[in-house]
Image: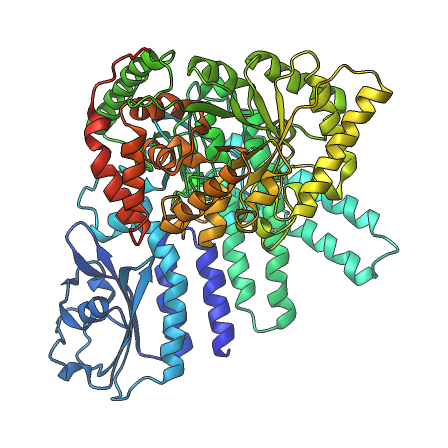
Amino acid sequence: MNILDSLRTIFQEVNTARSLPEVLTIIVTEVHAAMGAEVCSVYLFDETDQHYVLMATKGLRQQSIGKVRLAMGQGLVGLVAAKEEPLNLQDADKHPKFAYFEEIGEEIYHSFLGVPIIHHRKVLGVLVLQQQAERRFAAEEEAFMVTVCAQLSGAIAHAEATGALSKLASAGRGQSKEAIFHGIASSPGVGIGRVVLAQQTMDLASVPERHTSDPDAEMQTFRQALASVKQDMRNLGVGLEGKLSSEELALFNVYISMLDDDSLGGEVIETIKSGQTAQSAWSSVILKHVRTFRHMEDPYLRERASDVEGLGKRVLGYLQQTDEKKKPLPRRIVLVGENLSATELADIPVDRLVGIVSLKGASNSHMAIVGRALGIPTVMGALDMPCAELEGKELIVDGFTGDVVSHATRTLKRAYIQRQREEQILIKDLQKLRDVPCQTIDGFDFSLWVNTGLRHDNIQSLRSGADAVGLFRTEIPFLLRSSFPTEDEQVAVYREHLETFAPRPVTMRTLDIGGDKDLPYFPIEEENPFLGWRGIRISLDHPEIFLVQIRALLRASEGLNNLRIMLPMISNLAELDSGLALIRRAYKELTEEEGYQLKMPALGAMIEVPAAVYQVKEIGSRVDFMSVGTNDLTQYLLAVDRNNPRVADLYDALHPSVLRALKSIYDQAETVNCQLSVCGEMAGDPISAVVLLGLGYKNLSMSASSLLRVKSLMLKVSRKMANDLVNDALSLSDGAEVVDFMSSALEPYRQAKNKPLSK
């Protein structure tokens, strides 16, 4: 087997391994075989005592695993970790850093190649090769080891996050089961509830090992799943008769026979009898056979590994459906999923939802925005959280820090409950500001609006004392349906919101899908969705959808006259002109041909694409208002995917480049006397809101849950002070400096007690 085949085999097996010991065994066994070395070992860093521990080896004494521990910087392993680069020696035993451990039995090995295992700039361990012969390992061998370590790092980081690494490293020293997973704080608050998985995954490797007290019930469930899959295979075979050769059709019979009691089915039954659940038993048996097929020399048989895996996923799908029907929803739900979207809320009673955790996404992902709108503590980008293992378990979601805690100790849980109480007191205190006029201490009037889209938002928005709706996300009613709503159905939704806020203005953004907002019945698959077909581009390409929405918006506004229509994702004037022309066409048809008594609403455009920043004057001269979408504007200016937790720390709305773009937008808008607001999530952060005030913005739109927090700080500052602070901030070199500077300057005002003010 050549190097590429070896790498492919290692990657496949690591990805299907169900535990850290299994991962480590695969690595040392496969690398040992592929490299032809006498020894392959893995040392991992144990945070509990700050030592590198021998965790797996092929070639050294097995009884030394878990016992050999090197302090930071000790030995050649410590040197590799400290330097964060490979170390290739032909006479390792003569190196001044060489550390001798008699119990390992490595005194006869002279050649040494150590490569650090690094994940997100953190050294997790070292992978080591050793040979008796005094020689330097070849460059190709070193490159192979570096590639393996890059693959291994993700699995090790996951084990570290879940506590599996600590448990293995401590060799039963009585470690707490408490585990803390780190994500991105996306909606403030503390939620404590039980995990409900948003969507069951048919990933065999992610099924945790679970045991049952009722093997008979599990066997019945398993046999029902097998019967369903066998019938699927028979139906598929019948449907393909005449289209495939007899040899190809015979394959379906092979699949059916594999599920019989004398094959895979029987092996699983025996595993269930030993105490495992049907899902756990099926996954472990299938993964074992997949690995067996992948090691076969015959190419045809190797290809059958994917067939077995596909068959395994189909059976697992039935097992998960059966399991899902059995489970009642808990009273307090923490919704967890790999890549959550608003559509997952359709199956969850929102009044029982106390927390949201998504493995993917960032603080400005669409789901995070929905979480803030609902006032539900939300954490995004919790990459290393083992979803399947936590199903039904109690979880603490800290939307302030981004931490997610499982198996919390009583002391920690009590501390979080106390934080919940303190937050409730703060919210009650902030309510006193509801009717206080929005005015700085030097008499400058500002307006605080809300971003909304869910019916649930309305009550909270009105309670916050919002002056208007700065952004109604019309895509949310679309996201929660299984097909495009009719014109009359849209009229009913829009009318309800317009009536709720009347006579306050309601800015309704036209359908903004694409990017991280796909409709389940209108999927858009692109390699670069944020640079692709989204927003106004889809609307103009599908006027039959766009015109129905515009007609519904206009009809819903009849007699209320508080509607404002805003076009998203404008990147050139031709798009804007085309969108405005379609709106005017719909208005003309409704008023002149169908007799509706309508007033033409104010028309606006979003400034969220860098190209639009340089055409604010031209755009502003064509519309009644403009609104800056700082979420996308920041993303595009900094070239940071806001849904990618790997680069989430680079997403910075207070980056000097973003601030200078915002200043340019404001200055240009002033020259054409066009009303300007900010509707991005930046407006909902109190410190950032003061920055926007200093830049000249006086209309800020945010989640209802953020409004009174922002108001509390803005009532305590003067516009002149905000302006002076921003002028200094604009000269700083990076976003971290801006945050530190503004936080330090505003800290006394943030701590000051709120006092109701009056004119």
The answer to whether one can see residue 205 in this image is no
- Looking at the image, residue 738 sits to the left or right of residue 334; the answer is left
Q: Name the quadrant containing residue 695.
A: top left
Q: Is residue 101 above or below residue 331?
A: below
- Identify the residue at the far bottom of this view: 134
Q: Position of residue 547 (x, y in %)?
A: 76, 32
Near-viewer residue (377 or 335): 377
- In front here: 332 or 588? 588
User: In this rendering, is residue 613 above or below 462?
Assistant: below
In this rendering, position of residue 491 left or right of residue 95: right
Q: Is residue 49 above or below residue 338?
A: below
Can I make out residue 600 in this image? Answer: yes
Q: Position of residue 488 (x, y in %)?
A: 75, 19
Tell me where residue 489 sits by quadrant. top right
Q: Quick check: 552 left or right of 394?
A: right
Q: The C terminus appears in which quarter of the rendering?
A: top left
Residue at screen point 68% across, 45% down: 575
Q: Nearer the viewer, residue 40 or 404?
A: 404
Q: Residue at x 25, y 19 (%)?
A: 422
Q: Is residue 506 above or below residue 358?
A: above
Colour mapping used in the image: rainbow
**Residue 418: x %, y % from top left:** 23, 21
Place of residue 463 in the rendered image (x, y in percent of width and height, measured from the top left): 43, 13
